[in-house]
Image: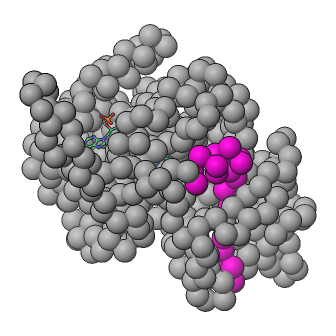
Amino acid sequence: MAKVLMIGAGGVATVAAFKIAQNADVFTEFMIASRRKAKCDKIVEDIHKAGYKMDIKTAQVDADDVEQLKVLFNDFKPELVINLALPYQDLTIMDACLACGCNYLDTANYEPKDEAHFEYSWQWAYRERFEKAGLTAILGCGFDPGVTSIYTAYAAKHHFKEIQYLDIVDCNAGDHHKAFATNFNPEINIREITQKGLYWEDGKWVETEPLEIHKDLTYPEIGPRDSYLLHHEEIESLVINYPTIKRARFWMTFGQQYLKHLEVIQNIGMSRIDEVEYEAPLADGTGTAKVKIVPLQFLKAVLPNPQDLGENYEGQTSIGCRIRGIGNDGKEHTYYVYNNCSHRAAYEETGMQGVSYTTGVPAMIGAMMFCKGLWNTPGVHNVEEFDPDPFMEQLNKQGLPWHEIHDGDLEL
Ligand code: NDP
């Protein structure tokens, strides 16, 4: 029924590939391409070992290079390109999609390499071009952004006349038994957490110092966890698409051990994203030469690979939306919709931990929505602009069931 090309072969891509293979009735032709073909081949090998028979093609591509992408797209001719590489590659992949007539989906908004700054403006600037070409671009289809935005759309469609207060709450209560590791690409993760906090209140953005605001929030089946207010990209589109929102915030849990390491990393300059000169030994042993390295990229090379955390990962994640507003009956109501995901169950199914799982599954479902013709409106769209119902139905079927609490105490 549909031909899809996935770019990237990391943790999230591995999960999405497993889920695509589990839904072979929708995804009839599938290729995985990444910087290193061997990593794509390894994913295919693992999928086949797990008993899924799908014939999956693989290829090498540098997604920073539009010309290379164009050659690949013109050769494979995918209807949809699923971008699960890094946020740095969003624009090159969108350019190649426009040039070759392919539709597009990603899970994170564009970030320039030399500036820890993420916002949708760069990708929204492609709206007219995608519209004119009759192509659909689906932005931010992971868990957060992604499912959290779809939860909000679902609440607006079924439970609220007016959403007034939105708090997205993201708890990882898992233990990977490492002193310090990030759950997805360390470079992207540390850039996100070390920047200033930002939230929306009364029609304007309010900035905070990094991790300045925090409070204990109680998560289902987990209990209280210290939760920190962060800037997170889905708030940017949600306050535009739901203008009745008076305040929108994003919270994420961090343990003391994680924060202690993060502080040291920052204090010793290892979170820097500018180039520094380093005296490196020459390969032939004849002396040294000055080379330029980016400390955060170097740090990524020595930290545990998030893809390898799954084996001993215990506990679960809990991510959801806590909403207060005016219900369809004209009275004030609260609503909490969330999913809990077990790291162990994710690992047993896909070999990856829960954070990769909660991102890769929605990426596959978004692709499924497109391929089934349910989410294809030419232009560039955030996921809350589409019908949430068929997506919510698939979440229950594909391993991320959701639960609702009506009129409970939101703590916020
Ligand atoms: P990884 O670093 O594990 O994977 C990224 C993959 O992209 C790697 O296989 C990497 O290659 C490949 N890649 C990097 N640069 C290029 C390039 N120039 N050309 C081709 N391939 C390239 O990251 P994750 O799997 O953890 O994350 C994937 C995406 O998901 C990121 O954008 C991340 O921000 C996003 N994400 C979104 C979440 C959400 O809820 N919305 C949550 C978590 C992550 P190699 O293997 O050779 O390094």
**For residue 59, above or below residue 256:** above
Does 254 appear in magenta?
yes
Residue 18 makes an appearance in the image: yes
Does 91 appear in magenta?
no
Q: Residue at x 53, y 22 (%)?
A: 351
**For residue 248, above or below residue 371:** below
Is residue 275 left or right of 336 when viewed as pictured? left
**Residue 401 location, quadrant:** top right
**Residue 221 location, quadrant:** top right
Q: Residue at x 49, y 32 (%)?
A: 304
Q: Residue at x 15, y 52 (%)?
A: 66
Q: Residue at x 27, y 35 (%)?
A: 34
- Split into quadrants, the picture shows ligand 1 in the one at top left
Question: Which residue is at the front of the view, 171 or 262?
Answer: 262
Highlighted magenta segment, given as a residue range: 245-263
Location of the C terminus (image quadrant): bottom right
The x, y position of residue 360, in whole percent, is: 49, 39
Q: Residue furthest bottom?
A: 203
The x, y position of residue 238, in whole percent, is: 57, 72
